[in-house]
């Protein structure tokens, strides 16, 4: 398994998938802290897609800082833990600004509906 750093994008094999889960060999953005990744063979990621997202589609975050990814969006609604065996080549690293935007989107997705105030409580994490 490569040394995974938070904010890096790797190719990963997400098969098998069920239903509307993102599947196949695709880019994924590493969310977990680098120290955690070094101590485990599991990382928490969000898939990245090149499919244009509908206007107003909740939580998709446009990624522009990785030159190798032409047009791409991180999909925080599809957050998942994956084995290090699924990772392949490094694609690049998102900007700190984009990483914070993805982290906020993940928090908004998993926290209660009144999360606007709750997300502020997690500022040190993002």
Image: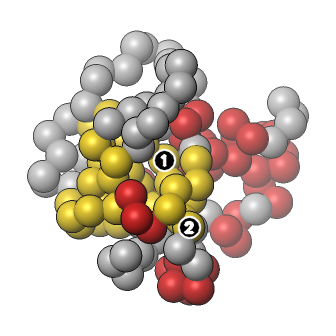
Relative depth, front residue between 48 and 87: 87
83 with respect to 29 (left or right): right
Q: In the figure, residue 29 lies in which quadrant?
A: bottom left
Q: Position of residue 98 (x, y in %)?
A: 41, 54
Which secondary structure lies at badge 1?
strand
Q: Is residue 118 visible?
A: yes
Q: Residue at x 37, y 76 (%)?
A: 1
Q: Residue at x 21, y 64 (%)?
A: 89
60 with respect to 77 (left or right): left
Tag of residue 46: 1
Q: Residues within 10 Å of mark 2 (few under 14, many from 20)?
A: some
Q: Residue at x 34, y 48 (%)?
A: 13
Q: Position of residue 44 (x, y in %)?
A: 56, 59
Q: Residues within 10 Å of mark 1 (few under 14, many from 20)?
A: many
Q: Position of residue 88 (x, y in %)?
A: 26, 62
Tag of residue 99: none
Relative depth, front residue between 43 and 105: 43
Residue that carries the numbered disc 2 in the rendered image: 42
Q: In the figure, residue 111 lies in which quadrant?
A: top right
Report how many numbered discs are placed on residues in the image.
2
| 89, above or below 59, in the image | below
> Which quadrant, please, contains the C terminus?
bottom right
Q: Is residue 62 visible?
A: no
Nearer mark to the viewer, of 1 and 2: 2
Instruction: Report the Cα–Cα distance between label 1 and label 2.
Output: 13 Å
Q: Position of residue 18 (x, y in %)?
A: 53, 25
| 122, above or below 67, in the image | below
Disc 1 + disc 2, Cβ < 8 Å = no
Which secondary structure lies at badge 2?
strand
Relative depth, front residue between 41 and 121: 41
């Amino acid at each position: 398994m490569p040394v995974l750093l938070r904010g890096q994008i790797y190719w990963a094999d997400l098969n098998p998938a069920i239903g509307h889960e993102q599947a196949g060999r695709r880019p994924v953005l590493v969310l977990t802290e680098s120290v955690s990744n070094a101590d485990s063979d599991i990382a928490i990621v969000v898939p990245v897609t090149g499919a244009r997202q509908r206007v107003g589609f909740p939580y998709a975050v446009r990624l522009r800082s990785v030159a190798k990814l032409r047009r791409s969006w991180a999909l925080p609604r599809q957050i998942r833990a994956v084995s290090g065996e699924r990772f392949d080549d490094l694609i690049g690293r998102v900007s700190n600004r984009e990483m914070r935007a993805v982290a906020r989107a993940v928090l908004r997705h998993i926290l209660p509906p009144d999360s606007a105030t709750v997300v502020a409580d997690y500022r040190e994490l993002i």
